[in-house]
């Protein structure tokens, strides 16, 4: 199997690349060489995917059985269209890493693979879309929906879209799980978002990578929600963080009304917490039927803590600084209870 990974140097792209090499596949990666080290054993190809000449040069290294695109998060749909058009003749299929943010109903409604998508043209530029007053929909969601349409316009039934919610695990650059682990390690009483029994559905980066490779080798098409089918309660999540960090900390469960009243930013100041009903109601039955296998989230937590202790932070990324509540703000909330 011969594949091209667009990206391929950190987090999901790195995991995909490492697992593909472990399978004995021939792996090329395409990136600018600025965000991480190449995985040993790949054929690295340098270039900017928004530059036509670089894409034409890339195409000369083909053909490939599949392209796995892990790096379209910050691209306008028209730039995704440029990439797919340039590689149409040298790739058999395209596996596109998308997001649940492409759905009209996200995060308010339960979602299935066939839920309606946001409307965005395949050739839209970076100005298309808007972010709603309550944080949904998002400009990001519109742009990613347009990116999916750009892929479909060129690859049609040879395209598959993976729509994760939250990806955690070793190498995480966003900082959600690392923040909770470090907060647990500090100990003491700490704010936890009630209800404790709320189930969450984060998925391990290694499991997403394995599923992406399976789709690269398959003949499926269409979109798959990629969320943990069993999930874990928030209480179970935090208890595992306490256990792996050998902490005596105590979560104090604070109801959403108080958190909102105190101005706690959802999704970032308390990572993984959001009040919208559909956030953790994303059906991944289609992906499971197609071969998605998810390890227990407790294993993801343990392995992430081991990675942090061994390697520390990954590539610097501005989103890391967005996550976590300031100690002074947390203390104020606890004192008000």
Image: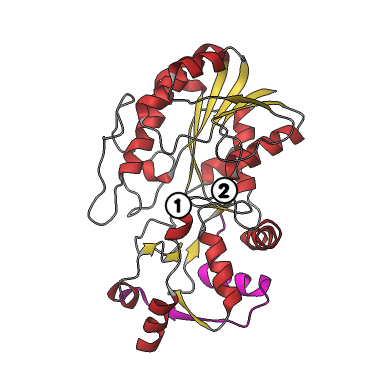
Residue at image coords 55%, 21%: 93
* Residue 318 - label: 1
Name the side, left or right, on which 278 lies relative to 299.
Answer: left
Q: Is residue 241 magenta?
A: yes
Q: Check the image and report above or below for 43 versus 284.
A: above
Circle 2/circle 1 CB separation < 8 Å: no
* Residue 93 - label: none
Residue at image coords 34%, 25%: 122
Q: Position of residue 71 (x, y in %)?
A: 50, 35
Tally the marks: 2
Residue 277: quadrant of the picture = bottom left
Q: Position of residue 292 (x, y in %)?
A: 61, 43
Q: Check the image and report above or below for 52 versus 319.
A: above
Residue at image coords 61%, 70%: 241
* Residue 315 - label: 2
What span is colored magenta in the figure? 229-257
Residue 150: quadrant of the picture = top left
Q: Quarter of the image for the C terminus: give it.
A: bottom left
Q: Check the image and report above or below for 188 versus 208.
A: below
Q: Position of residue 326 (x, y in %)?
A: 42, 72
Q: Check the image and report above or below for 3 versus 135.
A: above
Query: Can you name the residue that lies furthest to the front here?
Result: 34
Residue 58: quadrant of the picture = top right
């Amino acid at each position: 199997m011969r594949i091209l990974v667009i990206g391929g140097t950190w987090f999901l792209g790195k995991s995909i690349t490492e697992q593909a090499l472990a399978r004995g596949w021939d792996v090329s990666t395409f990136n600018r060489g600025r965000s991480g080290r190449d995985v040993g054993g790949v054929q690295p190809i340098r270039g900017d995917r928004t530059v036509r000449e670089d894409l034409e040069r890339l195409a000369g290294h083909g053909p490939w059985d599949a392209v796995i695109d892990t790096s379209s998060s910050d691209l306008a749909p028209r730039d995704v269209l440029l990439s797919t058009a340039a590689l149409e003749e040298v790739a058999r299929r395209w596996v596109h890493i998308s997001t649940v943010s492409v759905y009209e109903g996200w995060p308010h409604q339960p979602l299935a693979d066939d839920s309606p998508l946001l409307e965005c043209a395949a050739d839209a530029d970076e100005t298309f879309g808007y972010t709603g007053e309550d944080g949904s929909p998002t400009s990001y969601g519109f742009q990613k929906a347009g990116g999916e349409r750009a892929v479909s316009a060129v690859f049609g039934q040879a395209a598959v879209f993976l729509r994760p919610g939250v990806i955690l695990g070793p190498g995480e650059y966003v900082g959600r799980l690392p923040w909770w682990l470090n907060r647990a390690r500090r100990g003491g009483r700490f704010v936890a978002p009630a209800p404790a029994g709320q189930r969450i559905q984060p998925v391990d980066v290694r499991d997403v990578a394995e599923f992406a490779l399976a789709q690269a080798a398959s003949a499926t098409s269409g979109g798959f929600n990629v969320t943990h089918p069993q999930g874990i309660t928030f209480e179970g999540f935090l208890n595992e963080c306490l256990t792996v960090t050998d902490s005596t900390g105590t979560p104090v469960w604070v109801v959403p009304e108080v958190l909102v009243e105190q101005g706690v930013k959802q999704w970032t100041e308390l990572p993984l917490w959001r009040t919208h009903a559909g956030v953790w109601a994303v059906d991944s039955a289609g992906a499971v039927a197609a071969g998605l296998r998810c390890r227990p989230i407790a294993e993801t937590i343990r392995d992430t803590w081991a990675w942090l202790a061994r390697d520390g932070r990954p590539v610097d990324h501005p989103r890391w600084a967005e996550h976590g509540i300031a100690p002074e703000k947390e203390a104020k909330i606890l004192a008000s209870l």
